[in-house]
Image: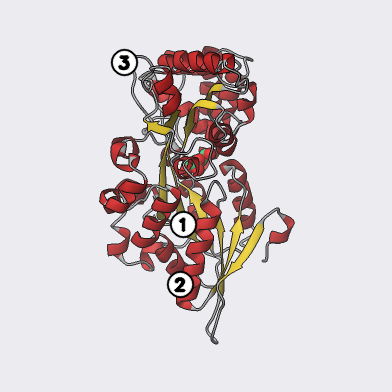
Amino acid sequence: MRFMLSSVAVLATVVGGGFGAQAATLSISCGAVGLELELCQEGAQAWAEQTGNEVTVISTPNSATERLALYQQILAANSADIDVYQIDVIWPGILANHFIDLSEHIPDDQISQHFPAILNNNTVADRFVAMPWFTDAGLLYYRQDLLDKYGKQPPATWEELAATAQEIQDGERAEGNDKMWGFVFQAKAYEGLTCDALEWVDSFGGGAIVADDGSITINNPQAALALDTAAGWIGTIAPDGVLNYAEEEARGVFQSGNAVFMRNWPYAWALGNAPDSAVSGRIGVSALPKGGADGKNTGALGGWQLAVSKYSANPELAADLVAYLTSYDEQKRRAIKGSYNPTIEALYKDGEVLAAVPFFGELYDTFVNAVARPSKVTAAKYNQVSAEFFNATHEVLSGEVSGADSVAALESKLDRLSRGGRW
Ligand code: GLC
């Protein structure tokens, strides 16, 4: 069955020029956050030229939540329209059945270059369904020039972040920048808020919503405190509009010079330092603050993989495109040009990569110790778990409910969803 891609809002570009009788046209769906689409097109083009095929690059919604809904629609129709899917680190358990086992197509020595934890994440019921492409961890961006001006250090705790943000916001506004805000992040009701809120909760020692053994842990005082703390930022150090911000909205404010701090993924580094950025050369990056002196620095584990559809007419060729795009050289190019974190460990020791993105080395521990969302244990139900969590969090941030009431209600919902913790 053909799924009518034209019925959804997607942008497709054809790259390469097929030659010869054997030439095929593959299609790949890529993200478009920051430089993603451009880098995907360039990579696909290089493969197309090398192999004499053509690739249609399809741009999909920025929101992971919307992108998953689109993929599910296309895959449920067993559509052959997309050969290669860019999938989120939290989706293997949801989508695995639609993808081929790549271990039958890509040599072991190429697969084993990647971080074992991600390979394990991408293996479902002994099938290796996706090659790691880039990894992600939540980071704190700050305006080094403003911290210097006010004699401040990057904050160790969220409390310190709020105090520094308020002081600099007030000072800069008094000097005439009435658009200045202390802190921007992602608080729209979507997957990105699950990441931000998990960071707050985990940094306060409140766990990761559902533990690895399946038990629901979110109803605890530390989690409630974390959510209440974040609610206190709205309208004080963060604009009310942050309740509708995803990654790119936050980056827009920070990059135009109107925020002291920003929570974002590594990709924001390359763009923030680009010639057209108002804050180029004035940005510092650190781990996210701790939840109180006894808390911990934590960043949510994100990242994207490439998977080949079972419905593809050219699975062998599609796997070759995946092998090319996830290779050492291509990940190196993406790291240097777009600050996308490699999933190949050796690239974290590559001098050219470290020169372009120094925090790949300085914050290495943040990347390898990032906190995972509970997608492995909740598997096919992860998306519902996440939606319950981001909606509950959004209500707390909007001032509709207290952190304690919210996590108690969330526990009951997750209990029903899991039928008593048995996912
Ligand atoms: C980033 C992460 C991804 C996450 C998404 C949420 O793209 O890599 O894992 O789900 O942000 O917005």
- Of badges 1 and 2, the one in the foreground is 1
Determine whether the residue tagged by mark 2 lies in a helix, strand or loop. Answer: helix
Mark sitting earlier along the chain (1/2): 1
Cα gap from disc 3 to disc 2, whole angstroms: 51 Å
- Extreme-right residue of the structure: 7
Q: Which is nearer the N-term, disc 3 or disc 1?
A: 3
Q: Quadrant of residue 189?
A: top right
Side of 11 relative to 213 (left or right): right
The outermost residue toward the bottom is 21
* Amino acid residing under circle 2: Glu
Residue identified by numbered label 3: 294
Closer to the chain start, of discs 3 and 2, is 3
- The image shows residue 221, relative to residue 61, as above or below, that is above
Residue shown at 47% from the left, 72% from the top: 317
Task: Give the structural element (helix, strand or loop) at label 3.
Answer: loop
Question: Residue 347: where, in percent of width, then height?
Answer: 30, 52
Q: Amino acid at mark 1?
A: Leu
Name the residue located 55 percent from the left edge and 51 percent from the top edge.
Answer: 31
Q: Nearer the viewer, mark 3 or mark 2?
A: 3
Label 1: which secondary element = strand
> Badge 1 is on which residue?
306
Residue at the image position 62 percent from the left and 64 percent from the top: 13
Q: Residue at horizontal 55%, vertical 68%?
A: 312
- Name the image quarter holding the N terminus: bottom right
Q: Which mark is residue 316?
A: 2
Query: How far apart are the two marked residues, 1 and 2, measured between alpha carbons?
Result: 14 Å
Residue 45 % position (x, y): 51, 68
